[in-house]
Image (cartoon, rainbow, N blue to C red):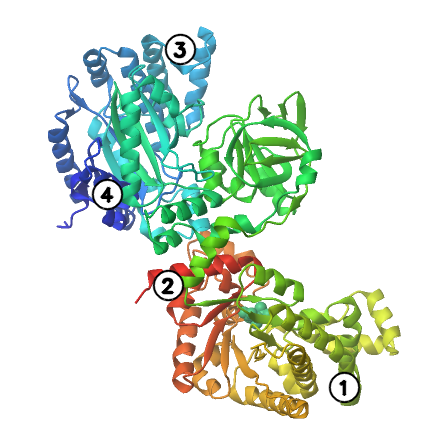
Amino acid sequence: MSNKKFVFMFSETDETMKNLVGGKGANLGQMTKLGLPIPQGFTVSTEACTVYYQNKENLPDYIFDQINSSLVELEKITNKKFGDPMNPLLVSVRSGARVSMPGMMDTILNLGLNETVVKGLAEITNNPRFAYDSYRRFIQMYSDVVMGLPKPRFEEIIDEMKEERNISLDTEFSANDFQEMIQKFKALYKKELNEEFPSDPKKQLYGAIEAVFASWENPRANYYRKINGIPSSWGTAVNVQSMVYGNMGETSGTGVAFTRNPANGEDKVYGEFLLNAQGEDVVAGVRTPSPLAELGKIMPDVYQQFIDLAKKLENHFKDMQDIEFTIENGILYFLQTRSGKRTAHAALKIAVDMFETNMIDKERAIMLVKPEQLDTFLHPQFDESALKKAKRIGEGLPASPGAATGQVVFNVEQAIEQVNKGNKVVLVRLETSPEDIEGMHVSEGFLTARGGMTSHAAVVARGMGKCCVSGCHGLVVNEAKGFFTVGGEKYHLGDWISLDGSTGIVYGGKIDTRPATISGDFEKFMTWCDEIKTLDVRTNADTPNDAKQARAFGAQGIGLCRTEHMFFEADRIKAMREMIVSENIEQRKKALAKLLPMQQSDFEQIYEAMEGMPVTIRYLDPPLHEFLPTQDSDIEELAQELGVSKEKLIDKIASLHEFNPMMGHRGCRLSVSYPELAEMQTTAIIQAYINVMKRNPDYPAVPEIMIPLVGEVRELKFVKDIVVETADKLIKESKMDLKYLVGTMIEIPRAALLADEIAKEAEFFSFGTNDLTQMTFGFSRDDAGVFLKDYYEKRIYENDPFATIDQEGVGKLVEIAVKKGKEANPHLHLGVCGEHGGDPRSVEFFHKVGLDYVSCSPFRVPIARLAAAQSAIKYKK
Ligand code: PEP
Ligand code: MG
């Protein structure tokens, strides 16, 4: 028994209660408070969901008792009675997690109907067709969602009946037809499940609520959570809402609307509706709906009321809203509102427009764009000259912008198979459904024959930032035979097509793309982020080109230049190999002398590309065997080049073999064995610096020399002494007043634990969270993907610790090192250069623990800048 409250009437909740009653429930409560016309109801909390799972997937009686009391309360409010044939209360049962998960959780409408109630409903509404249509829909949904009897089994019956009657639309069925359909549905139910369809409305309600809780763990929901980083511990709430009917006839209808255009952000209410239909018809994309503006002609008053209230909601929530509504016999009801999913273009435009019209402040504007969405601007668009030559084969709705080119696939399995082979695919379907989510995620874009701008395909595409053309005219998909036709053309599985999600045009063949540019709203928005963020954003760049690209994206310096990448180039690898196979120090120094000018010239170009911004250069890091050939013929060639016998070279390669190279002779250990290596790299860095400063005396740059893979202060000190001796000598000879910093990477747990010792010899720390994750978990960064998927499936880990920082373990080491390091050296400068530096959730963590900067690949720089600004707002002191 528990005294805790698990069930809340809409009048008891508001927008601040999302964690407890879910997003949908909280907004229904808030809309009730704002005085909007809302069919009333109650919400069973997310905490009840937790109890359901703790209690072996059963709701305890004390929660059912609260549901029953709320039902009685709802009967009072609506003046109707659950199960009363002459005045029936019917309800919808819908899921509602803290954040919206479109299409992920299941909905049941018209609950409370049985043979007696449906008769009563037919009589009191004087509309038997409506009553029996509602009942058959209920049987279908309940059987599918609660009992797992798939929808297509029912669709088969419907199709057979259409054929018998020679009709093509559901709207052509009569009341009698629906009665016959109901009997057939029930017979199917009995045959498959060995029991009668439940007639007791309470039993229906209990079953439906438990089914929504159970659907929190269905594979689609799990997949959606994984790609969106939603913890499974949140659970979902369940909303039980009294029904209103959009299928009562021609003065009834249902629709979905956005307060602004979700594809391009235009400030104009944008929506679609269907007359004489229930909500699922619009969202499922089964019938193609009419544009909302048409409603203005059919029911001008209702239309105006809708527009006014929609804007009221947008003003209240200070965000673009996605609204579901129903009109029952000319009366408007709002069924739900939530922040609308939008394309990256729309997100930026909406944020900038709302700020510029004084609706919101800059901070709010920054919170309205998801960091990951910026990715869209950083990726290619169609090359215009290639587009002119392209063959146009069809046109549909421009449901989600961007350019997609790929090989045709027709289902999830084909998509995954092709992508695993390294191919790019475009998913072509009659319409998409939540089952397709995984295939959609790996595809470049989607093309559908049916459905409008608010169909599943369109909504999911915008959420994922993928390109989508929906409702393509004349597109006929034959999945079974593996082809589609459009405009008289036939395309088979594996053929190339291209989609333009901004115009809705479909092209045959592959079209070249060109890189995106930063300008307009994007540029403006990014400067706002820079005003607000406190974390600097640097980049990981090894070449002058990368450095230039990163600066164009707003990088404030280089946080990691991996020098080894310079040695892999064709003209350098030989000298590098010579250095590795050297027998003695003289030979090694000779080889290093060949590398020196090349490395020095690279550094000069990088300093110049960065124009005085900080540049952190890391010393050689990988194990040496990575530079040596493995193929017999290559070994022979190298032996000849080096003038040694093949056998000798083979022996040398074998001697470099290590069982665990990632824990082997690499990082600063190389300079401990071969101090002349650190000497050469220091000379290259400092000589390049001297040369560049002679040419550009105003550059404020101070090179940052970074020693990798340190675990003990004495090894850092050993390498640092070489660096300082070499650098100071060169600077003294130059007679210039030049400064440089020496710091280290923290990427070995021991270094994090002894950070106070290490900080005495380091002017900066850069967390190498790739290796730190590898060493903390004991997972190989190159191979762990193979078995980590089992860990996600079994819920041991929810996401990839190499992509998003593990705050509890690896993050703990970062926190310890920050604290100890700062205590020992208050001037210590702190950054991160592992892959996590470009991951928004990790950036938030690094902001929180007090790092000075993050460093990430050039293409993630804008994402990190936005994530840093959002973190600054979230944790404002
Ligand atoms: C790291 O380990 O996080 C790092 C940045 O270094 P690398 O990936 O080169 O080992
Ligand atoms: Mg490393």
User: Looking at the image, is mark 4 or mark 1 earlier in the sequence?
Assistant: 4
User: Looking at the image, is mark 2 or mark 3 earlier in the sequence?
Assistant: 3
User: Looking at the image, is mark 3 or mark 1 earlier in the sequence?
Assistant: 3
SS class, disc 2: helix
Q: Which is nearer the eye, 382 or 571? A: 382
Mark 2 to mark 4: distance in Å?
Answer: 41 Å
Which amino acid lies under the numbered mark 3 shown in the image of this protein?
A: Glu
Disc marking residue 847: none
- Residue that appears at 30% across and 34% down: 310
User: Vertically, is 117 above or below 16?
Assistant: above
- Residue that appears at 23% across and 43% down: 59
**Pointer 3 residue:** 172
Mark 4 to mark 1: distance in Å?
Answer: 75 Å
**Pointer 1 residue:** 589
Mark 2 to mark 3: distance in Å?
Answer: 58 Å
Evaluate whether residue 223 shows in this view. no
Indicate the position of residue 228 as horizontal and vertical percent values: 43, 50
Which amino acid lies under the numbered mark 2 shown in the image of this protein?
A: Ala
- Assess disc 4: are there few (<14), some (14-19) or many (≥20) residues with their C-alpha within 10 Å of its C-alpha: many
- Assess disc 2: are there few (<14), some (14-19) or many (≥20) residues with their C-alpha within 10 Å of its C-alpha: many
**Pointer 2 residue:** 872
User: Looking at the image, is mark 2 or mark 4 earlier in the sequence?
Assistant: 4
- State left or right for residue 641 relative to residue 107: right
SS class, disc 1: helix
- In the image, is the residue at mark 4 within 8 Å of ligand 1 by its beta carbon? no
